[in-house]
Amino acid sequence: MNWIKILLAGIVGGVLMNIAEFVLHGVILAKTYTKYPEVFTQEQANPLYFLLIALVIAFFGAILFSKTRKCWADGWMGGATFGFFLGLVVFWGRFYDALTVDGYPYFLSWCQGGSALIALTIMGLGLGLVLKN
């Protein structure tokens, strides 16, 4: 494995994912979140934490993508497909919130799952651009 390429792919994928998450959660879903103060009552976190988490997720995603690279199409399309399937895993995992957090509406599980699916597909696109067959 070429660790320099994996690190670069993780950075590219993480930055793309962070931008997508900002647009999805900070712009598109912002008013939706204010409708549920019983669920979202904490103080706003430092934005650098979100970038750090996106970079860590993308780095481990880059390792997994690199190990399975031959299974995916060439270029960005293979990466986006990888990200989509990874996003499906996270999408269905978001429904645990509605089962475990008191007052968490299923509607938000769909919103959170959909945004994860989109953000991870975009992250995978970045991985596919850097990690070629």
Image: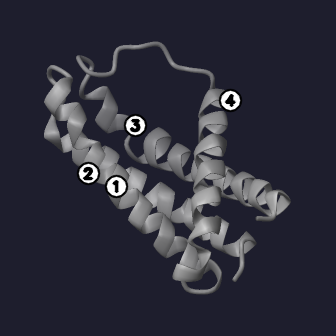
Helix, strand or loop at disc 4? helix
Q: Residues within 10 Å of mark 1 (few under 14, many from 20)?
A: some
Alpha-carbon distance for marks 3 and 4? 19 Å
Q: Where residue 42 appears, x then y in whole percent?
A: 41, 14
Residue 30 - label: 3
Tags 3 and 4 in contact by the CB under 8 Å rule?
A: no
Viewer-side label of 2, 4: 2
Residue 28 - label: none
Tags 1 and 3 in contact by the CB under 8 Å rule?
A: no
Q: Where residue 73 appears, x then y in whole percent?
A: 55, 86
Q: Residues within 10 Å of mark 3 (few under 14, many from 20)?
A: few
**In which image quadrant can residue 117 be found?**
bottom left
Residue 48 - label: 4
Q: Where residue 102 appears, x then y in whole percent?
A: 15, 20
From the viewer's side, name the closer residue of 24 and 16: 16
Q: Is residue 64 above or below residue 99?
A: below
Alpha-carbon distance for marks 1 and 2? 6 Å
Alpha-carbon distance for marks 2 and 4? 27 Å
In this picture, residue 115 sits left or right of residue 68: left
Tags 1 and 2 in contact by the CB under 8 Å rule?
A: yes
Q: Amino acid at mark 1?
A: Val
Q: Amino acid at mark 4?
A: Leu
Dot 1 corresponds to which residue? 89
Q: Amino acid at mark 3?
A: Ala
Q: Residues within 10 Å of mark 2 (few under 14, many from 20)?
A: some
Dot 2 corresponds to which residue? 92
